[in-house]
């Protein structure tokens, strides 16, 4: 499969989850004409990667993509986040990032986040390596996992989720996903530390 076809397939996957129209995104990502887009979609339909509607991935089309799922609070985007998300994206074709809800963020960080869940979603969505950002589910993280159906679940160096918990949860929803633990070259970098140091510098002025 050629690169532009893979990109179109990836965008259609993302738009299926978002419930959005893909044409503008395809134009933006591929810089090809409307006629070329139509031709490539027709070819994907002919090769049974897409249903006849030209929008819905078949099982063959979905299996052609490696989807990586990563999650976190992402309250203050710092170099550690960028490195981790770049590493996550390198594992597959599509990177889906789940930001924690405000309530979950408070439980995880023991403080109220500086940015709301919608603001954090917008920030993460603006990062070039991220294909889709979603707000997580408070009651069951595996609802989002089941919606995305990733091949790989990437955990950051500082995430407390145990791999067995993730693996067992995936088995419950009949998902055979690999768990990848990512490393950071700057593990001392964290949103909480940045917020604390910024607060101290303001008080010291």
Image (spheres, rainbow, N blue to C red):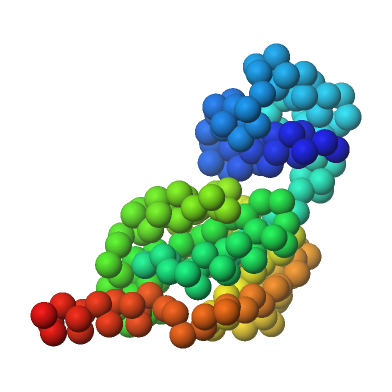
Inspect this view and state whether residue 111 appears. Answer: yes
Residue 57 in the figure: left or right of residue 158: right
Residue 51 in the figure: left or right of residue 150: right
**Residue 35 location, quadrant:** top right
Q: Nearer the viewer, residue 138 or 111?
A: 111
Q: Residue furthest top?
A: 35
Q: Residue at position x 75%, y 69% from top?
A: 178
Q: State whether residue 13 is above or below residue 103.
A: above
Q: Which of 97 and 186 is in front in this view?
A: 186
Q: Nearer the viewer, residue 153 or 183?
A: 183
Inspect this view and state whether residue 150 appears. Answer: no
The percent position of residue 195, horizontal first and vertical second, equals 29, 77
The percent position of residue 156, horizontal first and vertical second, equals 57, 75
Q: Residue at position x 53%, y 41% from top?
A: 18
Q: Residue furthest right?
A: 47
Q: Residue at position x 71%, y 73% from top?
A: 179
**Residue 11 location, quadrant:** top right
Q: Which of 182 and 198 is in front in this view?
A: 198
The percent position of residue 102, horizontal first and vertical second, equals 34, 66
């Amino acid at each position: 499969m050629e690169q532009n076809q893979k990109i179109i397939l990836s965008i259609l996957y993302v738009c299926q989850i978002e419930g959005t129209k893909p044409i503008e995104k395809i134009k933006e990502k591929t810089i090809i004409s409307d006629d070329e887009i139509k031709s490539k979609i027709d070819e994907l339909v002919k090769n049974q990667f897409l249903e006849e509607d030209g929008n819905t991935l078949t099982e063959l089309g979905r299996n052609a993509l490696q989807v990586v799922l990563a999650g976190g609070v992402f309250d203050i985007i710092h170099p550690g986040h960028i490195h981790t998300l770049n590493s996550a994206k390198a594992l597959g074709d599509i990177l889906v990032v789940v930001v924690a809800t405000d309530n979950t963020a408070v439980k995880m960080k023991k403080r109220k986040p500086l940015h709301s869940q919608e603001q954090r979603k917008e920030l993460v969505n603006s990062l070039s390596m991220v294909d889709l950002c979603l707000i997580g589910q408070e009651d069951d993280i595996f609802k989002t996992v089941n919606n995305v159906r990733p091949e790989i679940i990437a955990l950051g160096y500082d995430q407390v989720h145990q791999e067995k918990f993730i693996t067992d949860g995936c088995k419950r929803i009949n998902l055979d996903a690999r768990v990848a633990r990512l490393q950071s070259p700057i593990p001392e970098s964290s949103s909480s530390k940045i917020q604390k140091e910024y607060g101290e510098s303001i008080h010291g002025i």
